[in-house]
Each structure stands twice: as structure tokens, then as C-alpha cells.
Amino acid sequence: MGAFAAGVAMLACAPAQADTPAWRTGVLGAALGGVTEHEHVDTEHIFGFTMGSDIGEKGEIEFENENVGVFGKRAGIYNTLGSLNLLKFTLTDNFRVAPGLSFGGNVIRNVPGYDNRSAAAFQGAVLEMRYKLLDRETMPFGLTLHAQPGWSPIDEATGAQAQGYGSEFALLADKELVKDRLWGAFNLWYGLGASNDVGANAWSRDSSLELHGALSTRVGAALVMGGEMRYLRAYDGLGLNRFSGEALYIGPTFSMHVTKHVGLSGTVNVQVAGDAVGDPRALDLDNFERVQSMLRFNMLF
């Protein structure tokens, strides 16, 4: 799933024409002059893994490439990368839909409980939907509902062939704490999934619960930076049935425009605390990884 983070925002928008959306006047305009320091900031991607409530303006079309890398288990070599490619259509002021395809790969060596593997493959398809309940520009805070069902022919954690179905749901809230300068966000995520390894007769089922908190501040006309904290809990069963482990991640984030229509954002989160059921050692490296990172590319049309 998806899943938490702190940011630098694709932002600092130049004064726009009456028929020009705010996102069309980004960092490149700032570099060329004519952009004031206090232009509109789109909060969706300024918090890293943590998401803001903005969904864009009606009629916008956006391509997004989100690359998530996770690294490190208790022993051996464990590196996985997933690349989710979404095409976002903002159909109304409050509703956006985004079909997507995912690709990825694994490099796993001498990790207890995992087969050695080095491979890349198609990892499935998703349909992201977001509905904005509260507009942060006119209400005390912004609030957006997120849902993303998906299918995968691969177990993303192990790289093994497996039929998998799942979905993630989230409440995405944010607020402008200091006008044009400081933003905060809070997310609540719930994910569930079921998978069946090729050749196996039994399905495995799991679920997760995540709390994300983040702050981001403008550090220049075109740059927003910050930090986030994410608390993750893993369970056996689709309905948070049996607790398996927990992990706490923290890390810095960034977001910026490369050109007027192209943005980059990302984060690196490190597990600083955790506990797996049945393992007295520090950190939960059974259900989670030492490091979770993300680099996101966005292009608006």
C-alpha cells in the first residue's frame, strides 16, 4: 500500500491569468523572476509519504510516477523497488480518479524466511479514487477520502508469483498553520489484502493500520521542506484480527518544481523503534524494513 512522510513542495506559483490554474506557474517561473514568494502551494505532495488534502482543479490531467524503495532486514541483503504509474483525472472540484500500473523488482540474498531472488516484473494494477470533503481554503482544515483497490500477480515483498487482491483506505487531513509559510498534515490509513502463492492451496490474509503526521515549511519561492513521523501496525487477518508488530519511522522530505509543469518530491524514512510479536530484539524487521524511501515525479498537462 501504500503507505507515511515530510516534504519540500512543488510550489511558488507565479501570478496566473484568470483562466490559468495555479499549478501552471511553478518553480521555473520563480527562477526567471515575476513570481512572488507567497504564491499558492498545492499540499498533496509536500509531506513525503504523508498526503495533503488537495486534489487539483477540475479538468486537470496529471501523470505521476511514484518509486518506493524499502531496504534492510535482520540479516542478509533485502532491497525491493516498486514503481507505481498513475494518470490522474480531476473530474469535478471534489472528485479525482486515477488508474495505474505498477512495476518493480527484488534483490534478496540470505534473508531468513525468504528465497534468494533477483528479478523485475509487472506488479499489477490499481484504481485510485479521492473525494474532497472539506476544502482547506474555505474551511478550518482540509479533509479528503482516499480509496485504492488493486490486483497483483506478484508478492511485492518476496517477488514470488502469487495472485493478490487488496485495497487501502485513508483519511487525509491538512491545515495551513502559518499563512503561505507552514503546513501540517495528519493521515489515517487502513489496508487489507489476500494472496495465494502459485501452487498453494491456502490464502494468506493481512491488514495494516498507519498514523502519519507531518510538518512542511516554505524555504524559498520554489521550495518547501519538512519532516514526518509514521507509526505502522501489522496484523494477520483482514480486519486487524491478530497483532503482528509495529514500527515507528521518521525522516525528512522535499518537494520542488523542475520546470513549470514538472515536479519532484520525496523522502527517506528510517525505523527508529519497533517490536515484532515473538521477537525480543529491538525494531520490527519481520513485518517492516529498516529504511523506506520514496521519489515521486509529477507532470501536469
Image (tube, rainbow, N blue to C red):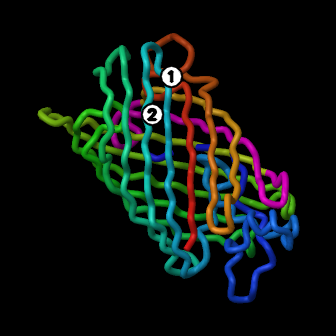
Q: Which residue is mark 1?
A: 284
Crowd around label 2: few <14 · some 14–19 · many ≥20 (10 Å): many
Rendered location of residue 129, percent (x, y): 45, 65
Q: Which residue is mark 2?
A: 234
Give the magenta-colored segment's residue range.
217-242
Determine if the magenta segment contains residue 225: yes
Viewer-proximal residue among 125 and 202: 125
Residue at the image position 45 percent from the left and 70 percent from the top:
97
User: Identity of the amino acid at label 2?
Assistant: Ala
Reply above or below: 141 against 107.
Answer: below
Question: In the current view of this chain or complex, which residue is farthest to the front?
Answer: 32
Q: Secondary structure at mark 2?
A: strand
Residue at the image position 45 percent from the left and 13 percent from the top:
75
Determine if the magenta segment contains residue 197: no
Rendered location of residue 241, percent (x, y): 38, 36
Query: Badges 2 and 1: C-beta atoms under 8 Å apart?
Result: yes
Pointer 2 or 1: first along the chain: 2
